[in-house]
C-alpha cells in the first residue's frame, strides 16, 4: 500500500468516525429533549386533568344546590390516570406538589361517595355538600399553586397581588357565581392567605374613622365612641416651701416709685426764706428735667407768693 492510499484510507476513516460521533450526539440530545418535552406535557396534563375534575364537581354541587341534581347516578367518580402515570416513574417535578394533588383527589373522591350515599337514601345532603365545597376551594388553591408557582407550598410562594389570583381564575373559567350564595374567587383568595401565602393588598382591619383615630392618638380609649381620647388626670401642683428671703419679700410689698423732686422742694428752709430774684437757675441733684408749668389760660392776676420780693 502506497503512502497516498494509506493517507486516503486514514482520512476517510476519521471522517466516518466524526460523522458517527456527531450522529450519536445528535440522537442523545434529541432523546433528552424529547423526554423533557414529554415530562412538561405530562405536568400540563396533570393541571388539565385536575381542572376538569374540579369543574365537573362544581357543576354537580351547583345542581345539588339548585335542586336539579337528585340522583346519585349523575355524580361521576373522580379518576386521574395522568397523575398516576406521572407518579409511577421518576421525574424532575416537585413531588410535594404532586403529593398534595393526590391528597386532594382522595378527599374529593371521599366527598363524592358521601354525596352519592346521601342522594341514594334521600337524606339531607346539605352537610356533605358544604364539606365538599370546602374541599373544592382547597383544590382550586392547590391548582393555582401548581400552575403559577411550580407546585410550591403557600408559605414558600412569592408575594402576589390578589387580583392576579382572580385573573387566573377568570382565565380558567372559574366564575365567581358558580355556586349560589358563595363568591368563589374571594373564597380561594382567603384560603390561600389563611394557608400562609402573602397576598397584597392586605385586608383592612380598621375602618377609616378607627384608623385616623389611631393615628391621632394611639392611647385613645377603644371602648369610647369614635375612640375619643381619655381625659388625662390633672396632677395637683404643690407649691415649694418659701425660704426666709422669699417670705421677707412677700411680707414687704414693693413701694411705688417716688416722684423726682428738687432739693429746694425738700428743704423746709428754702420755702420759708425768700429766694433771690437774681438767681437764674435752680441747681437740682436729679438730672431729670422738671416739667414746665402750663401756660395760663385766663387773664386773672396770680396772687403773690409769700416770701418773694417784687
Image (spheres, helix red, strand yellow):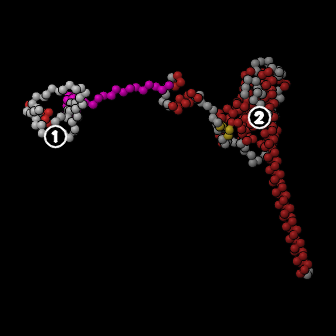
- Which residue bears the numbered disc 1? 281
| Residue pictured at 67% horizontal, 42% vertical | 158
Label 2 Cα neighbours within 10 Å, binned few <14 / some 14-19 / many ≥20: few
Q: Out of 196 and 89, give the one closest to the viewer.
A: 196
| Mark 1, other Cα within 10 Å: few <14 / some 14–19 / many ≥20 | few
In magenta, the rendered stretch is 228-254
Q: What element carries label 1?
A: loop
Residue 33 position within the rendered picture, expressed as x and y whole percent measured from the top left: 81, 53
- Asked if one can make out residue 113 in the rendered structure from this viewpoint, the answer is no
Residue 263 visible in the current orientation:
yes
Q: Which residue is drawn at 84% across and 64% down?
A: 21
Q: In this view, does 309 lie above or below 92?
A: above
The disc label shown at residue 261, or none: none
Magenta span: helix, strand or loop, mainly? loop
Quadrant that contains the C terminus: top left
State left or right for residue 139 relative to residue 262.
right
Q: Does the magenta stretch include residue 85?
A: no
- Snapshot quadrant of residue 274: top left
Identify the disc placed on residue 170.
2
Q: Where is residue 81 in the image (x, y as percent from the top left)?
A: 82, 38
Cβ–Cβ below 8 Å for labels 1 and 2?
no
- Circle nearer the viewer, 1 or 2: 1
Residue 85 locus on image (x, y percent): 81, 42
Q: Which residue is drawn at 14% across and 33% down?
A: 265
Q: Magenta span has 229? A: yes
Is residue 303 or residue 269 the one in the foreground?
303
Task: Return the residue nearer the eye: 141 or 115.
Answer: 141
Nearer-N-terminus badge (1/2)? 2
Please tell me which residue is depicted at 84% across the width and 55% down the height of the picture. 30
Amino acid at each position: 500500500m502506497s503512502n497516498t492510499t494509506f493517507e486516503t484510507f486514514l482520512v476517510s476513516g476519521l471522517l466516518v468516525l466524526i460523522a458517527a460521533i456527531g450522529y450519536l450526539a445528535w440522537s442523545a440530545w434529541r432523546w433528552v429533549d424529547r423526554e423533557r418535552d414529554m415530562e412538561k406535557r405530562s405536568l400540563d396534563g396533570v393541571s388539565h386533568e385536575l381542572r376538569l375534575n374540579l369543574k365537573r364537581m362544581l357543576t354537580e354541587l351547583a345542581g345539588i344546590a339548585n335542586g336539579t341534581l337528585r340522583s346519585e347516578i349523575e355524580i361521576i367518580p373522580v379518576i386521574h390516570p395522568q397523575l398516576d402515570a406521572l407518579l409511577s416513574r421518576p421525574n424532575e417535578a416537585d413531588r410535594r406538589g404532586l403529593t398534595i394533588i393526590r391528597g386532594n383527589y382522595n378527599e374529593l373522591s371521599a366527598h363524592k361517595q358521601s354525596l352519592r350515599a346521601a342522594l341514594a337514601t334521600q337524606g339531607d345532603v346539605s352537610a356533605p355538600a358544604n364539606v365538599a365545597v370546602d374541599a373544592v376551594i382547597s383544590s382550586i388553591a392547590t391548582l393555582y399553586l401548581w400552575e403559577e408557582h411550580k407546585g410550591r407550598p403557600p408559605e414558600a410562594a412569592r408575594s402576589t397581588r390578589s387580583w392576579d389570583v382572580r385573573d387566573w381564575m377568570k382565565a380558567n373559567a372559574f366564575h365567581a357565581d358558580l355556586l349560589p350564595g358563595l363568591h368563589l374567587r374571594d373564597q380561594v383568595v382567603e384560603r390561600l392567605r389563611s394557608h400562609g401565602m402573602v397576598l397584597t393588598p392586605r385586608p383592612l382591619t380598621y375602618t377609616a374613622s378607627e384608623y385616623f383615630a389611631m393615628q391621632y392618638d394611639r392611647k385613645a380609649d377603644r371602648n369610647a365612641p369614635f375612640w375619643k381620647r381619655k381625659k388625662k388626670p390633672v396632677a395637683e401642683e404643690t407649691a415649694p416651701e418659701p425660704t426666709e428671703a422669699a417670705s421677707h419679700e412677700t411680707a414687704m410689698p414693693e413701694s411705688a416709685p417716688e416722684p423726682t423732686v428738687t432739693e429746694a422742694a425738700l428743704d423746709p428752709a428754702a420755702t420759708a426764706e425768700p429766694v433771690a430774684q437774681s438767681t437764674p437757675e435752680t441747681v437740682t441733684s436729679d438730672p431729670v428735667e422738671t416739667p414746665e408749668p402750663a401756660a395760663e389760660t385766663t387773664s386773672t392776676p396770680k396772687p403773690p407768693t409769700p416770701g418773694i420780693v417784687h
